[in-house]
Amino acid sequence: MILSLASRSVTNTNGLHVSVTGESGKGKSHAFTTLLRQVPARFRLAGRMSNKALFYIEDLQPGSAIVFDDTTLSEDMAEILKGVTTSFREPFLYRTVSKDRKGQVCTIPERCIWWVAKVEGAGDDQVFNRMLTCWIDESAEQDDRVLARVLQRDQAPPDDQGQERPEVLTCQAIWENIGRQMFHVIIPFATSIRFVAHANRRNPEMLLDLIKANTVLRYMQREQTTCGRTRCLTATREDFREAARLYQLLNGIAGGQETKLTWRESALIGIISQNDQEEFTIPQLQKQTGWSNSCVHRLIHGYDSRGTMYSGLLEKCPAISFCDRTVVTDGEDGASSMRRRTNAYTFDRELFRSWSLGGSVWLDDDPDHPSASQQSFSNPQQTAARFENEFTGSDPENNTCNNDIILSSDQSPSKSQDTENTVSAGGHGTQGPCEREIAEMLGDRIEKTREGPPFQDPRQDRGRTYPLENRDPAEGLLQCCRKPGPPAPAKIHIRPQDYKPLEVPDHTFCRVCGHPWTHYVEKLTVERKNRPKDCWQPYQVCRNCYDRAKVRAQQSATILPGTVDPARMERLTTSLCRCTVCNLDLATYIDRGTGTKLCETCYQRIAAIQDHGEVAG
């Protein structure tokens, strides 16, 4: 929302508009109210309004923040929003007839930004596609923090006596100062930016607008030039790193920019993707989520509310499909039978991986990104130039643009002259297994172009130790999408029970081996709570370290002699619970007499122990 306000001072932008989704009572209205207090009063516009009210407000200022809080956008208002966001730099005209039956032109001023808060989203897919889509934090940890803050607030005496705090007044003065400036922001490295997915043409523009807004916020620290009467700012790679960090969060942890999923839809599809089942039903999802049948059905199929159609996962996610089945159940007497209709859903994991990994962005000269050595990612300028210079028309036999040649190259981007990077003896020399897995998830081929010694901790690169966020991009560790982490110990063991999988692999160092990509994040465990508050940032580990820790935990899990008999175990057709012994994998066997459930690894281990005991006997 802060970057959205800053985008008003950029001349070459389409504006940043924000859509916040989340359950009722989780803080959407509070977030809007808190930030609106920092904006000068004449730029605020909130509350209920009719469809055409914006055209008749006489004192509506250019660059106003228009807020719709838990308000259903009517069809007319949605059309106005789409028109205003499209003509962001110019006033939006509306021609009507006055009471004297004379033509009248009404306008909405230029550079107005829109903030929309709604439980299910804006409703209109075209509106949703024009906005930064973020989620309110609905986690249990955030509920605990909110409760503690509320209790502490009512225990303390009033401190402001109805007056705005000096910090709020300072923020208003800052926005006044920025609002008086207008800049054309130049991004000198724009042609080096790469995207995993850019089918949605608005999202790359939004990333560029995020970079420009970051630059304007720091305009006193950026290079300023004058082109005629236009003041220009030059963006830096620090601006890119900040924008890429937010863009990555909006594509997984804090929003659904590429997928357009709400928080609940993302949570549900995360549960579905973790289950190793070919088919599943709504009652099975109810047991795992604790949500009602109607809630799960609405998330999957969508629903109609007051004339507005909200799409579900079947429309948004191509990996989910279903078929309508009729199940016949025989009665106890054998003479009667019962027919029951049910939906059987299927989930394609390979398709889900390629569909969900669309939020990663990096610079072409970033040697750490796994896609840097793949042939399938090409330079957009070269691709566009090839299309423009192709004169063979649309004949598929003659048009080489219809072939895969346009997306391939004999030379890897990481080895090109423009992006070649010399790696020292202590740098990254080979691709780790986690890096190869990420490339496989992207559906592309890895070309092994790097040679050198095994992986070393990049924090010790070239014999120096300094914070990750201050690494020089010229030294081969450009920090796009990377968060600083604690120094990796020489040897550390983790508990796999304390970690959960990330929805999207993160460009953060593994706390165990130092690998630049991680797949698992630490839960809010007791150990994490006991750490100092400034160390509450969760640790993250790569898939290879997590798998080794899981194997080690499963092998060391205590099994009391005589408590488990493999001969009494039955294989489960569907598994909805975890192993009783290791509590890490889903159970595949069950002893119905004792209720003991085993995963495949623990079952094989117990069977081997029993066979060894019989041979010894």
Image: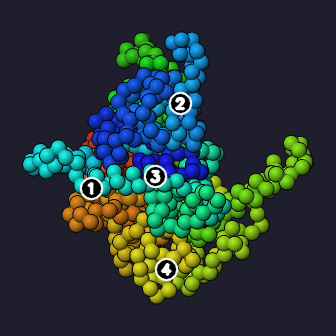
Q: Tell me where residue 259 appears, x and y as whole percent.
A: 53, 42
Which residue corresponds to mark 2?
Answer: 107
Which of labels 1 and 4 is toward the front? 1
Q: Is residue 8 above or below residue 410?
A: above
Are there few (<14), some (14-19), or many (20+) residues within 10 Å of tag 2?
Answer: some
Which residue corresponds to mark 1?
Answer: 167
In the rendered structure, which amino acid carries the disc numbered 2? Thr
Q: Are marks 1 and 3 in contact (CB under 8 Å)?
A: no
Q: Tell me where residue 134 appears, x and y as whole percent.
A: 43, 44
Image quadrant in which the C terminus is located: bottom left
Please report whichever mark, 1 or 3, sits nearer to the chain's N-terminal start.
Answer: 1
Which residue corresponds to mark 3?
Answer: 180
The CA distance from mark 2 to mark 1 is 35 Å
Q: Residue at x 23, y 48 (%)?
A: 164
Mark seen at residue 352: none
The CA distance from mark 2 to mark 4 is 61 Å
Are there few (<14), some (14-19), or many (20+) residues within 10 Å of tag 4?
Answer: some
In the rendered structure, which amino acid carries the disc numbered 1? Glu
